[in-house]
Image (cartoon, rainbow, N blue to C red):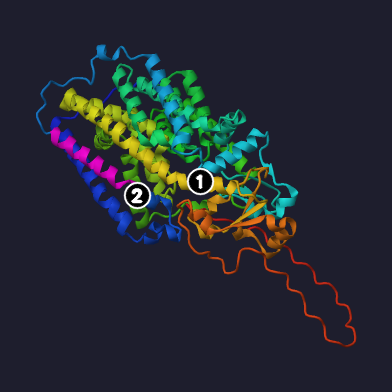
């Protein structure tokens, strides 16, 4: 079994100051380049909401400059203060006596507090709305699982309209008889357990509270004689705006963080039961919604097994993970691969280019600006100190680096998200390394400096970051929440939405997996003339065309339709002209009817 790693050598004051100078320079560069890229680059179309641009750039331009300035100010102040001679000898962060009073009850109290805050925030900040389609589709599939089904059958009278009824990221067979989420199933299966008791919105707050306990437990495994580091890791995780506000959402990312921390705790136990269960946990983590968050996190630790030549354990981990990968690919092949709307890897990945360099620069600034200021500074500072890290510490840092660098191969930015959600699964790694950075900095520059920084950072987070972030998010989500509520309560049997007339209008196509709700919401992009006539004949004036002005009243940008013909009412059937007088013509054989075109595959918009 692996032995607990000991911290590496503490850097000299001169070297530590040089790292702080580089850290301050990095934040200053992000402060200058971030808004410059978002405002002045070739992404003018992307910034223009009236032309269907990505919310990633709109949110960045609207929300981030103030926090980039805050981070740069804290980094510069830290570098300047650290130049003063230390007024006390090198020592550990806290005395053992000072931390002995912190026990299990306070840890549970912290976890419960996180649960309560995030549970209230799901309603008060997020309006209990799965804002992005990633969130909505997870809930869509959870309702299918809660009904005891793997897929949902589309009622026969609606099967000709499946393409128009299908939400983004829902995959359907070509005949329109059934549909299923295009993501992998574990997160939705867990959510189904909560949905069955009417508590689906509590899942992520529960996972957030459990993650608090796990990050403490992992820290005690990495540094068993350093209890204060464990509390610092808890503090850094809890103070992360990304952690707090994403835990109020319906994203799968809180589950990825929880399972990664659970895997890390089992691995760091260093005993047979821990190592037996770790890859089993990993298999579940791979299947949460896509395999990348766990795969990127776990890779450095699996290489550690190879480097240590633990061949039997390497074989065991390899066999379990291989079986798990085979399981999830079998799921994909059986239920998703041949369906319209299923994920296509050729559309997801691309060779990195200059635009992705700029996008990842913006993403890096999000990764930092959504943390408490001193935490962000410590993360960059400890990254410069990577040569002094012990093996387990390097593995944690490598997991963060892989999780960030991997997305250079994604040609599009993340779209919706609070912080940089693609690295949310390694927030535990960041919290652990941040606590290490604080301890190292205290040994170099003295406890007083680090304590003052921690107190100032906590005050900025509680009184500046959290209130402003909550206000920004609620203000952003509210128009969409009201629009979805409005559409869901239109007095009609069918609502037709032209997605080209409003910003993220395609997201309005949200239907119950079993089509139990009224009205049914259809996309005009996938309605053929014959489909429109069929709707008109069946529902008459109970068909409602959603107009741009109805959406505009909530503050969502709208613009003229891109449709070349009126969306509704349907074109009248053209009747042949009456034949001229004369002898009756011979009856012609009826023309064979042409098959209806299959539904068009929809490309993801983010």
Check the picture and name the quadrant holding the N terminus.
top left
- Taking the image as shown, residue 337 lies to the left or right of residue 390, namely right
Residue identified by numbered label 1: 482
SS class, disc 2: helix
Give the residues in magenta. Answer: 61-82
| Res. 369 mark | none
Q: Position of residue 498 (x, y in %)?
A: 57, 59
Disc 2 versus disc 1: nearer the observer: 1
SS class, disc 1: helix
| Majority SS type along the magenta span | helix
Whether residue 69 is visible here, answered yes or no, is yes
Residue identified by numbered label 2: 62
Give the image quarter of residue 24. Answer: top left
Task: Point out the residue furthest to the bottom here.
Answer: 582
Residue 76 belongs to magenta span? yes
Q: For this rendering, which residue is in front, 488 or 337?
A: 488
């Amino acid at each position: 079994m692996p032995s607990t790693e000991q911290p590496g050598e503490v850097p000299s004051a001169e070297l530590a100051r040089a790292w702080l100078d580089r850290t301050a320079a990095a934040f200053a560069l992000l402060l200058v380049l971030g808004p410059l890229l978002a405002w002045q680059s070739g992404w003018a179309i992307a910034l223009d909401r009236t032309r269907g641009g990505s919310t990633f750039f709109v949110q960045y331009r609207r929300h981030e400059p103030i926090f980039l300035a805050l981070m740069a100010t804290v980094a510069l102040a830290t570098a300047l203060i650290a130049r003063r001679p230390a007024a006390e000898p090198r020592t550990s962060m806290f005395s053992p006596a000072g931390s002995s009073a912190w026990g299990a009850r306070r840890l549970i109290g912290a976890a419960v507090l996180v649960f309560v805050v995030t549970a209230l925030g799901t309603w008060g900040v997020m309006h209990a709305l799965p804002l992005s389609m990633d969130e909505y589709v997870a809930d869509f599939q959870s309702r299918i699982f809660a009904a005891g089904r793997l897929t949902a059958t589309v009622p026969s009278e609606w099967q000709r309209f499946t393409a128009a009824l299908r939400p983004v990221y829902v995959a359907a067979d070509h005949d329109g008889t059934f549909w299923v989420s295009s993501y992998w199933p574990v997160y939705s299966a867990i959510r189904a357990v909560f949905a069955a008791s009417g508590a689906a919105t509590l899942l992520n707050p529960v996972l957030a509270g459990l993650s608090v306990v796990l990050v403490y437990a992992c820290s005690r495994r990495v540094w068993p004689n350093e209890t204060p580091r464990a509390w610092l890791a808890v503090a850094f995780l809890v103070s992360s705006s990304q952690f707090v506000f994403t835990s109020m959402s319906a994203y799968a990312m809180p589950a990825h963080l929880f399972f990664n921390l659970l895997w890390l705790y089992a691995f760091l136990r260093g005993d047979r039961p821990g190592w037996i269960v770790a890859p089993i946990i990993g298999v579940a983590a791979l299947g949460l919604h896509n395999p990348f968050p766990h795969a990127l996190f776990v890779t450095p630790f699996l290489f550690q097994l190879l480097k240590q030549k633990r061949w039997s354990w390497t074989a065991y981990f390899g066999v379990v993970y291989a079986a798990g990968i085979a399981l999830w690919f079998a799921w994909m092949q059986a239920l998703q691969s041949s369906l319209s709307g299923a994920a296509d890897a050729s559309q997801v990945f691309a060779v990195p280019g200059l635009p992705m360099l700029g996008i990842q620069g913006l993403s890096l600034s999000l990764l930092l600006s959504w943390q408490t200021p001193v935490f962000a500074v410590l993360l960059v500072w400890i990254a410069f100190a990577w040569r002094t890290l012990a093996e387990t510490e390097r593995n944690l840092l490598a997991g963060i680096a892989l999780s960030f660098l991997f997305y250079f191969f994604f040609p599009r930015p993340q779209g919706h998200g609070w912080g940089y959600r693609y690295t949310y699964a390694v927030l535990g790694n960041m919290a652990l390394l941040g606590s290490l950075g604080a301890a190292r900095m205290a040994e170099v520059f003295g406890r007083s400096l680090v304590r003052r920084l921690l107190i100032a950072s906590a005050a900025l987070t509680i009184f500046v970051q959290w209130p402003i972030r909550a206000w920004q998010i609620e203000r952003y989500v509210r128009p969409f929440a009201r629009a979805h509520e409005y559409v869901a309560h239109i007095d009609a049997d069918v609502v037709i939405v032209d997605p080209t007339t409003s910003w993220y209008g395609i997201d309005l196509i949200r239907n119950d997996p079993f089509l139990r709700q009224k009205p049914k919401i259809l996309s005009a992009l996938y309605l053929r003339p014959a489909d429109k006539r069929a709707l008109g004949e069946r529902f008459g004036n109970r068909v409602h065309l959603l107009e741009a002005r109805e959406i505009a009243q909530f503050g969502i940008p709208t613009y003229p339709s891109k449709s070349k013909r009126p969306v509704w009412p349907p074109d009248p059937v053209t009747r042949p002209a009456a034949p001229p007088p004369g002898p009756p013509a011979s009856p012609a054989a009826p023309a064979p009817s042409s098959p209806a075109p299959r539904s068009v595959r929809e490309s993801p918009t983010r």
